[in-house]
Amino acid sequence: MERGFAVIGLGYVGLPVALALARKFEPVIGFDVSQQRVAALREARDATGEVTEAALRETSLRLTDDPEALGEASFFVVTVPTPIDAERRPDLTPLQSACALIGPRLKPSSVVVFESTVYPGLTREICGPLLAKTSGLRQRVDFKLGYSPERINPGDKQHRLETIVKIVAGEDIETLERIAAVYGRIVEVGLYRASSIEVAEAAKVIENTQRDVNIALMNELAIIFDRLAIPTMEVLQAAGTKWNFLPFTPGLVGGHCIGVDPYYLTARAEAAGYYPQIILSGRRINDGMGGFIAQRLVKLLIAAERPVKGAKIGIVGIAFKEDVPDLRNSRVPDIVAELQEFGITALVRAGFARTFHRTRRADPRRTAPGARRGRLGQALCRAGAGRGVGRCQVGDNPRPGSAGHPLLEPLTGRCAATLAWGPTPSHFPESREKPLFGPEMHPFNVEYSF
């Protein structure tokens, strides 16, 4: 019987886990270092949009930013981010900080389960010794380690924690079964018991690596077919009639998973004396697609005999994918930076992201071309730090789905072209009756597709 449960990190991954545990066990403590995040959750406001207000109001989860509360737990779940640094090397700072917080509150017979994506061996070789050092306890004797990789897909209401098979692993059989007993209560579709922590770590990191490589192949094909003046999507539709052709499509790869996790695997491979070829090639292709789209748009402007330097380009969507407010590793700053190299001003219209980075209503005195407005504009420039993003105008708009085309109307008559990135038909239910882009809106319009 566990004394209590603690989830460290209440983001996209941690909050759903904490709420699920609180429905089955008590006490369950949800800890986050951000006082602002904890305060918002106490008011039943989840900026990520993953959890409803009702779920937060009804839960028995104890929300806190006080590390001392962790001392009540014997079962810890770590769900902190695992980012990369400017050199695309693993940044272990969040994991190290989590271990430093847990260690002094760790008591004998506790188990610490990590869900964060890492390279194989990191849980035992880095996290275990850190916990032992900060707690004064012995790893594998006084406390045990486990690993159960997260599989959260932000914005996806169908594939949720409860409906995705959960991989679980422990330092020994006893720990594995202890972890399985907990997760088995909250995951409806079942568990997969990995033979070791390293197998579970490797399984997680290759899930996103495989997807990244497959998308990179589609992106490279899109570049080739673009030069051959062949529509990529029509090619993929034709090829898809074969039963074993995988249904991947080209696109911008961002976010905190697919564009990051492969670097954890390649860093570990290089440490072992092997320099990966395909994985890193795929990363280079995907990282370059924002620039490719911007250059393609410039060519379209030239072909339409529109002036390039001084042009204004509207970009619809700012997050790394549709239906989420998350700006992390969004490739939109890449498009903006490349356009600025040609003397083009980007006017970015953000719909879903405004719920995460709220801006003030537009002030005509502050909307000169090139002006940066509000926290959303600042967030875009922070997201583009190191990618050459200068000043760009980011507008505050009504939530998608209101009358008309709320993201596009503010751009009417102001842009030489408009790029749509992110919004899906669900954002614009009226688009079934009339096109999003038409001659009545701009003198020249581009809805870029591969």
Image (cartoon, rainbow, N blue to C red):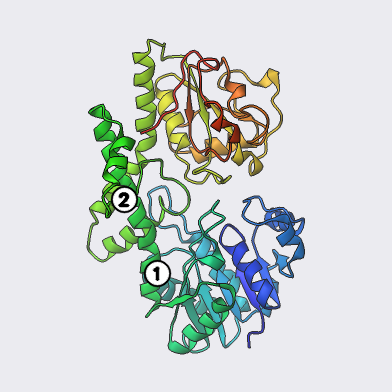
Which residue is under mark 2? 214
The amino acid on which the numbered mark 1 sits, given as a three-letter code, is: Glu
**Left or right relative to 414: residue 206:** left
* Residue 216 falls in image quadrant: top left
Of the two numbered discs 2 and 1 on the same chain, state the one appearing first in sequence: 1
Task: Give the structural element (helix, strand or loop) at label 1.
Answer: helix
Q: Position of residue 286 (x, y in %)?
A: 35, 43
Q: Is residue 326 above or below residue 417?
A: below
Quadrant of the image for the N terminus?
A: bottom right
| Mark 1 neighbour density, 10 Å: few (under 14) some (14–19) many (20 or more) | many
SS state under label 2? helix
The percent coordinates of residue 442 (x first, y second) are 52, 16
Tell whether 101 sits left or right of 383: right
Above or below, comparing residue 278 to residue 164 in the picture: above
Determine if residue 206 is in view: yes
The C terminus - image quarter: top left
Q: Which residue is label 1 attached to?
A: 201
In this rendering, the answer to whether 40 lies above or below 417 is below
Residue type beneath disc 2: Asn
For marks 2 and 1, give the CA distance.
21 Å
Q: For residue 220, say whether it is visible.
A: no
Q: Residue at x 33, y 37 (%)?
A: 233
Question: Which of 294 and 52 lies nearest the eye of the viewer?
Answer: 52
Q: Tell me: 155 left or right of 70.
A: left
Name the residue: 63% across, 85% down: 2
Nearer-the-camera pick, 310 or 237: 237
Query: Mark 2, mark 1: which one is toward the viewer?
Result: 2
Task: Identify the image quadrant of residue 172.
Answer: bottom left
- At 63% from the left and 69% from the top, the residue drawn is 20
- Residue 282 in percent (x, y) is at 29, 48
- Percent across and percent down for residue 335 are 43, 31
